[in-house]
């Protein structure tokens, strides 16, 4: 044992002696090394935040200038702090916590690299970062990767910080096959050019569709190019469809030679605009649903049901409410099915023609309602154009008579609920034009998320409101026959209101 200890001590002594005679002694990174760099003071001006100050930089032996990361990035609107999970120096944007649209940057001085994370993906970029006196320092290349252009004037000892981002606005549709392929290409391009910041908008969100329309105006696009997806706006040009893959990389390389991309979106304004749009759409859904519920087809059938249920007012309210609930549910289901079917079709490819078709549709129904207005004034109700076919009317009346037999029974309300659903399906032939038009406009305008469901529900409830008011009036003593006479007197005005509504819809489609 003693022999082994002696051998180890002799070996250790030999290594020390060898090191003392070596021309390249073994060294560790200490503060002595850090101080060996030449420190220089610089005045910096940040053109992005219009701020200025002084920083200390360190010149390495090879002439590379190392600048303090924290001072440069924080003056440019970023936050720099230590990641609580990994301990790395983390940089992100103050406004949306998404630095240059890429994710969080991690400045790893001990690994001498810069990386940024996009969801679960990490992209590594070359940057010779170091730690001096407890702070992270990096070369100009580090800031370039973050989208910051740092220009150093050695003679004047002045540093100018400006944006190095290449901005673009990309509009796509979630039902577009070409868009999916383009999206893959854009992801690859963003990895290749870290300072490429592409703002992406799905036009099936109402505010994004409106934004696409605004871009079309600003970039003065021709009619055939407006509203097309995929579209990408960069510098002073718009690339559409296959042009994105063929021309975008060249535009990225030459970006500094042309004007900067016009970025129209403002998160705060968009949020306000979206809130206003929702309230406007809700008000429109209430108004359109209520007017549509005044349809003579709907009113006459419900008055017939009330006349059958007048044996008992309580029975009338119970079965009448059940009937209206059935109509509401079926109208909502029909609207949901139609919306989902139309939303699954890529309408952007022929959006212009769809718009023209909807304008023609609205004008035609405005004229038909106007003709019915004159026929109703002449009391020629049977000659009106927009009414249920006679066979459908007879079937509805027969179902109501059959259902009335069970109105006093325990399951009477359930049976009337089912009849309400069936009757509303047939009534859709007479009352569905406004509803269908509203759904098409929702799809065209890119309403997304829970908003379509909310609008369809509000529309369906508003549709039965006139019938509910009618039932309450009868419940408090008004004769059904008298109400029928009153409805007949109002039919001309109902038709005139419907005509004006379709004219307004046509004008909205033309000028919106």
Image (tube, helix red, strand yellow):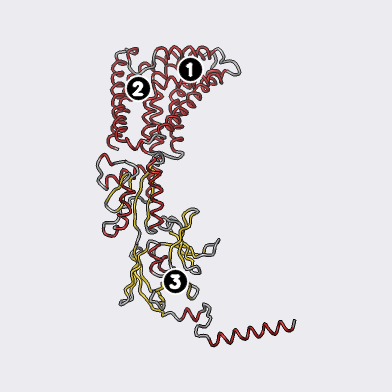
Task: Give the labeled residue for mark 2.
Answer: 494
Instruction: Tell me the crowding category of disc 1: few under 14, some 14 to 19, or many 20 or more residues within 10 angstroms, Cα based.
Output: few
Residue 123 in the image: x percent, y percent?
46, 58
Vertically, is 136 above or below 420?
below
Kindly report the distance in space between the C-alpha atoms of the residues bearing marks 3 and 1: 86 Å
Vertically, is 150 above or below 439?
below
Instruction: Tell me the crowding category of disc 2: few under 14, some 14 to 19, or many 20 or more residues within 10 angstroms, Cα based.
Output: many
Placement of the C terminus among the 4 image quadrants = top left
Residue 352 in the image: x percent, y percent?
29, 35
What residue is shown at x 49% (from left), y 76% (from top)? Answer: 133
| 298 vs 206, nearest the viewer | 206
Q: Nearer the viewer's eye, disc 3 or disc 1? A: 3
Kindly report the distance in space between the C-alpha atoms of the residues bearing marks 1 and 2: 24 Å
Instruction: Tell me the crowding category of disc 3: few under 14, some 14 to 19, or many 20 or more residues within 10 angstroms, Cα based.
Output: many
Task: Give the labeled residue for mark 1.
Answer: 477
Vertically, is 208 above or below 194?
above
Placement of the N terminus among the 4 image quadrants = bottom right
Task: Give the labeled residue for mark 3.
Answer: 137
Circles 3, 2 touching at the beta carbon (< 8 Å): no
Q: Secondary structure at mark 1?
A: loop
């Amino acid at each position: 044992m003693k022999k082994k200890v002696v051998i180890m001590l002799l070996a250790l002594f030999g290594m020390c002696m060898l090191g003392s005679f070596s021309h390249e002694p073994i060294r560790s990174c200490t503060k002595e090394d850090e101080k060996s760099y030449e420190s220089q003071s610089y005045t910096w001006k940040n053109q992005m935040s219009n701020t200025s100050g002084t920083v200390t930089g360190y010149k390495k032996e090879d002439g590379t200038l190392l600048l303090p990361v924290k001072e440069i990035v924080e003056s440019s609107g970023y936050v720099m702090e230590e990641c609580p999970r990994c301990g790395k120096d983390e940089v992100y944007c103050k406004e949306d916590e998404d630095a240059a649209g890429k994710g969080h940057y991690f400045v790893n001085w001990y690994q001498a690299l810069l990386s940024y994370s996009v969801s679960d993906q990490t992209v590594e970029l070359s940057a010779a970062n170091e730690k001096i006196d407890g702070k992270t320092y990096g070369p100009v290349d580090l800031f370039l990767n973050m989208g910051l252009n740092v220009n150093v004037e050695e003679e004047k000892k002045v540093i100018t910080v400006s944006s190095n981002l290449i901005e673009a606005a990309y509009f796509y549709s979630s039902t577009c096959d070409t868009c999916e392929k383009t999206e893959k290409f854009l992801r690859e391009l963003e990895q290749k050019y870290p300072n490429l910041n592409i703002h992406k908008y799905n036009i099936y969100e109402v505010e994004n569709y409106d934004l696409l329309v605004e871009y079309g105006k600003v970039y003065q696009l021709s009619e055939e190019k407006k509203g097309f997806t995929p579209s990408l706006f960069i510098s002073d040009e718009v690339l559409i469809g296959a042009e994105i893959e063929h021309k975008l990389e060249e535009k990225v390389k030459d970006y500094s030679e042309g004007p900067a991309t016009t970025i129209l979106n403002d998160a705060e304004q968009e949020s306000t605009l979206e809130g206003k749009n929702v309230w406007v759409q809700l008000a429109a859904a209430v108004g359109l649903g209520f007017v549509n519920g005044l349809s003579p087809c709907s009113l006459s059938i419900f008055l017939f049901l009330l006349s059958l249920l007048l044996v008992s007012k309580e029975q009338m309210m119970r079965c009448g409410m059940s009937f209206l609930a059935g109509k509401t549910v079926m109208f909502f289901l029909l609207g949901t099915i139609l919306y989902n079917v139309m939303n699954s079709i890529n309408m952007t490819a022929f959006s212009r023609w769809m718009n023209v078709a909807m304008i023609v549709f609205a004008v035609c129904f405005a004229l038909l309602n106007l003709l019915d207005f004159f026929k109703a004034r002449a009391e020629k109700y049977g000659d009106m154009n927009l009414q249920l076919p006679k066979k459908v009317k007879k079937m509805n009346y027969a179902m109501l008579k059959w259902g009335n037999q069970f109105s006093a029974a325990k399951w009477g309300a359930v049976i009337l609920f089912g009849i309400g659903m069936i009757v509303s399906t047939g009534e859709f032939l007479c009352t569905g034009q406004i509803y269908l038009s509203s759904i098409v406009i929702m799809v065209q305008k890119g309403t997304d998320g829970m908003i379509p469901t909310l609008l369809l529900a509000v529309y369906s409830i508003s549709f039965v409101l006139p019938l509910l008011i009618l039932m309450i009036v009868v419940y408090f003593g008004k004769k059904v026959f008298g109400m029928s006479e009153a409805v007949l007197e109002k039919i001309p005005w109902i038709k005139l209101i419907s005509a004006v509504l379709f004219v307004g819809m046509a004008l909205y489609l033309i000028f919106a």
